[in-house]
Amino acid sequence: MKILLRNALITNEGKTFPGSVMIDGAFISRIIEGELPADDNLSADEVIECSGLRLFPGCIDDQVHFREPGLTHKATIASESRAAVAGGVTSFMDMPNTNPPTTTWERLLEKRQIGADTAWANYGFFFGGTNDNIDEIKRVDKHLVPGLKLFLGSSTGNMLVDNKETLEKIFGECDLLIATHCEKEEIIRANKEHYKAKYGNDLDIHFHPLIRSEEACYRSSAEAVELAERMNARLHILHLSTEKELSLFRNDIPTVQKRITSEVCVHHLWFSDTDYGRLGNRIKWNPAIKKESDREALRAAVRNGRIDIIATDHAPHLLREKEGSCLQAASGGPLVQHSLLALLELCNQGIFSIEEIVSKTAHIPATLFAIEKRGYIRPGYYADLVLVDPSSPLTVSADNILSLCGWSPFEGFTFSHSVAYTFVNGCLAYAKGRLAESRPTVHPLFFNR
């Protein structure tokens, strides 16, 4: 089946140009620069007219929590990957803090089978490190997982790794990319006791960034960087949230040459602590959303290359689980359906260029994780593609949210763009507000290291 995407505005590999793309089966077979005449279909079996639409490689989200197995009242791999393709995300990498956690090879294989049976997007699953599973870590095939996830601060699930001897062994002996959640647990505990002693147990959301503070983030990230440099480990620090942490990262060499890389998430680029009064616990994440000055510094680091990847940390909870004090409310929220639209909105505001967004959400994730034949619009690459319509606004409401939890921190907001079409491996998965009638053909991501 040959499908011609005719006369789109294509952004790819630092350039934006009018052109067309031919899909042949699962792959991109041809890219044609310039306008095609309306009567020239290049012998395609199907033609989609794309005049006025923007064409990007599908987003690759390197940090999601799709909650399966064990937490399926919040989300499933099926439900959240449907939300993903509706948002232009064609590949995802899911985190291991499920129930049970993905900390043995057998559990990883079980999770991969769920992906094969139910996912609507291409899938990869991080392996989880604990204080006592180093032997399991050594069994992991580095071609089948994006990396090893270490929680250096406690979050959803019970996977805190805080044994110094274990960390030395993992950083020294592990042949995997090590992705870390960095918050210093001792500082968090001390801050929590300080504010409870001063103000009582009923601390509202404004205390969250004070408890999970800048110093907690910086100290943990700095310790991880020091350990990685000493052991020559391959370190990827997730969801940076502070200006102070940025000094730990380089921008004087290309990403492909870095041994230590970083990620920022959409919520830390969009929200600041000034939004807590309006949105409350709906924007409670770990690490916490912090000051406007932190947000501005993170945005600048995306532009100057200290930050390599933009992701979501999509982590749905039911709204009732988000109730209570900041010590009780669950941390995390759904983002994967609206992450690309939010970033395009920031482009409209002049904060980022579209070329930067495509690089940080598709090109660099593919390069950094060595994902085979994805992340770029190139002949011979998988046809993972998203077309967005800049003239068709989308207002987020309960009736168009696909995440199982049924809510979004963006509810009521009108984005200037909407996703028109999403292709996964050449299959049309989403078109103009509707999922395809059947699940697209999906594949496990292969990490060609």
Image: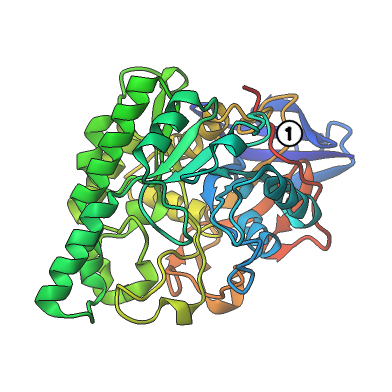
Question: Is residue 306 something one can see in this rendering?
Answer: no
Against 240, residue 379 (above or below) is above
The amino acid beneath tag 1 is: Tyr
Name the side, left or right, on which 268 lies relative to 367: left
Name the side, left or right, on which 175 lies relative to 42: left
Residue 104 location (% of width, % of height): 64, 45
Mark 1 neighbour class, 10 Å CA radius: few under 14, some 14 to 19, many 20 or more? many
Question: Is residue 234 something one can see in this rendering?
Answer: yes
Against 16, residue 311 (above or below) is below
Q: Identify residue for label 1.
A: 382
> Foreground residue, 224 or 169?
169
> Foreground residue, 439 or 43?
439
Residue 236 location (% of width, % of height): 43, 34
| Residue drawn 41% across the image and 49% down it | 265
| Residue drawn 61% across the image and 56% down it | 84
Residue 67 location (% of width, % of height): 59, 62
Name the side, left or right, on which 357 lies relative to 32: left
